[in-house]
Image (spheres, helix red, strand yellow):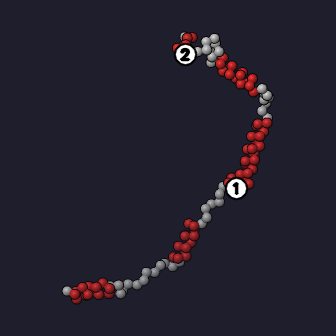
Amino acid sequence: MNTNKENRIDEILNSLDGCTQATAPDFFYTRLKARMEKEVAPAARTSWMLRPAYAFAGMAIILLINVLAVFNQPGTEDNTATSEVDTFQSLASEYRLNEGNSSISMYNLNQDK
């Protein structure tokens, strides 16, 4: 029985005697290396808008527009309290809040009908 196992093992080991080492096609490694370098190539350059010179110029333009908008406001009043009172009075008159009755209930809203 022991000899059967040894014969079987020898058969298996001898079956590899006729095998040769696998060979790669011509220029395989050159093509493989070129493909790997192509995949590792740096990404495309970033957008021109992300460059610092353009970013600072854009921010300067936006800042200039904001400054011009603040200083070129037509006729700003020095008396802001008066303008706020006028605003509140105009809102009150628009919503009929200044008509003699200071407490308006939900039931009085449909009075006009």
Q: Nearer the viewer, residue 42 or 63?
A: 63
Residue 88 falls in image quadrant: top right
**Mark 1 vs mark 2: which is more N-terminal?**
1
Name above or below for residue 24 compared with residue 80.
below
- 16 on left or right of 77: left
Residue 47 falls in image quadrant: bottom right
Q: Which mark is residue 51?
A: 1
In the rendered image, which quarter contains the C terminus?
top right
Q: Residue at x 51, y 79 (%)?
A: 26
For numbered disc 1, what is the local secondary structure?
A: loop
Residue 53 falls in image quadrant: bottom right
Outermost residue on the left side: it is: 1
Name above or below for residue 16 compared with residue 58.
below
Residue 72: where, in percent of width, then height?
Answer: 79, 35
Q: Residue at x 64, y 12 (%)?
A: 99
Q: Nearer the viewer, residue 70 or 58?
A: 70
Q: Residue at x 71, y 25 (%)?
A: 84
Amino acid type, mark 1: Arg
Name above or below for residue 24 compared with residue 37.
below
Residue 21: where, in percent of width, then height?
Answer: 42, 83
Residue 51: where, in percent of width, then height?
Answer: 70, 55
In the rendered image, which quarter contains the N terminus?
bottom left
For numbered disc 2, what is the local secondary structure?
A: loop
Amino acid type, mark 2: Ser
Q: Residues within 10 Å of mark 2 (few under 14, many from 20)?
A: few
Contact between labelled residues 2 and 1, with CB atoms less than 8 Å apart: no
Q: Which mark is residue 34?
A: none
- 4 on left or right of 74: left
- 6 on left or right of 105: left
Q: Residues within 10 Å of mark 1 (few under 14, many from 20)?
A: few
- Residue at the disc numbered 2: 105
Q: Residue at x 65, y 57 (%)?
A: 46
